[in-house]
Image (spheres, rainbow, N blue to C red):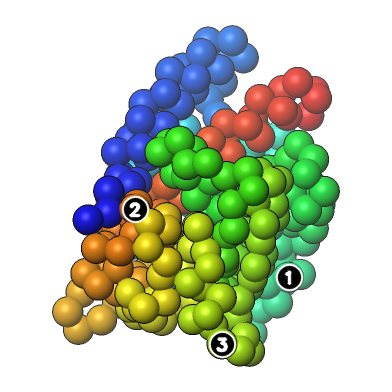
Amino acid sequence: MACIIDGKALAAEIKRNLKKDAEEFETRYGRKITLAVILVGENPASCVYVNNKVKAAEFVGIKSLSFRLPESATERDVEQVVKSLAADKSVDGILVQLPLPKHINEEKILSLVPPEKDVDGFTAENVGNTTLFKEGINSCTPAGIIYMLKSINAPLCGKHAVVIGRSNIVGKPVAMLLLKENCTITVCHSKTENLGEITRQADILIAAVGKPRFVKADMVKDGAIVIDVGINRTESGLCGDVDFDGVKDKASYISPVPGGVGPMTIATLMQNVYKCAVRRENAGL
């Protein structure tokens, strides 16, 4: 029976520590750390995510500014909001909730976020820093995954980590962060042949494929560490990309859904907001 990696408890600890840091920041600089959140449209999942992020910011002591635009907002409308916040010296971090409506170019909008305010770690400069193992802002979910692995004192150096999924938000950056920890990396995707043969070699298996219960027990090596990134809404409720009931008897550690990577993503976002604020103050921005 696998040990459960409790992302909810880890996230709560991170936020408690950040609350103290945010108080010290306010005392030192005479202002609150400020995060601006932009939501376009009424995507139900996005609305839930934004509300959870705002609640986390409130708990930590970070001031949040919400900018909600209708689904009918034009690309120019969104551009103007991002540019205004980019120029606003009182704003430390800008978060553009994805996905944006199809008529809006996400890449173009994200490129308007200054790297020093990019709390999601999505800009080309921050992605480049992650790839080059340089100091920067790492994407929230991948950074949260590394934190989870380190919380169980998982040996990473030399271990074979297999990532299922190659998205810009999770798959690619988590592969880079694992490589930075000296893991040997294999990235699998929809075109990968003999997927099960590859996943069965994994000491660490990261599932970020977006398919309910996709990873079955016969795809997992005995004693592997399994991190489930998926959040899938089904008729029976939320589930991950891993068949939890089948895999939990084979893995040594496993993250649950809900209560695993999700809370860690939000906690890591709060860490990124704090980092951005401190760096901006140190740089005199």
Q: How far across and how far down the image is residue 281, in percent?
A: 72, 23
Q: In the rendered structure, which disc, 2 or 3, sits on the residue that comes first in sequence?
A: 3
Sequence-earlier tag: 2 or 1? 1
Residue type at mark 2: give it: Ser
Q: Quadrant of residue 8?
A: top left
Res. 282 in view: yes
Q: Quadrant of the C terminus?
A: top right
Q: Which residue is mark 2?
A: 252
Element under label 3? loop
Three-letter code, disc 1: Glu
Quarter of the image that includes the N terminus:
bottom left
Q: Pick out the residue farthest to the top.
A: 28
Q: Name the residue tied to disc 1.
A: 107
Q: Nearer the viewer, residue 98 or 147?
A: 147
Q: Secondary structure at mark 2?
A: loop
Q: Position of residue 126 (x, y in %)?
A: 75, 50
CA separation, marks 2 and 3?
24 Å
Tell me: residue 283, above or below residue 201. Answer: above
Q: Residue at x 35, y 71 (%)?
A: 242
Where residue 226 sits in the image (x, y, percent)? Answer: 41, 60
Q: Are marks 2 and 3 in contact (CB under 8 Å)?
A: no
Q: How many angstroms separate mark 2 from mark 1 (CA)?
A: 39 Å
What is the C-alpha distance between the residues marked 1 and 3? 33 Å
Q: Which residue is found at the position 63% from the left and 32% from the top? A: 275
On the rendered structure, is 174 left or right of 39?
right
Identity of the amino acid at label 3? Answer: Asn
Q: Which mark is residue 194?
A: 3
Question: Mark 1 or mark 3, which is nearer to you?
Answer: 3
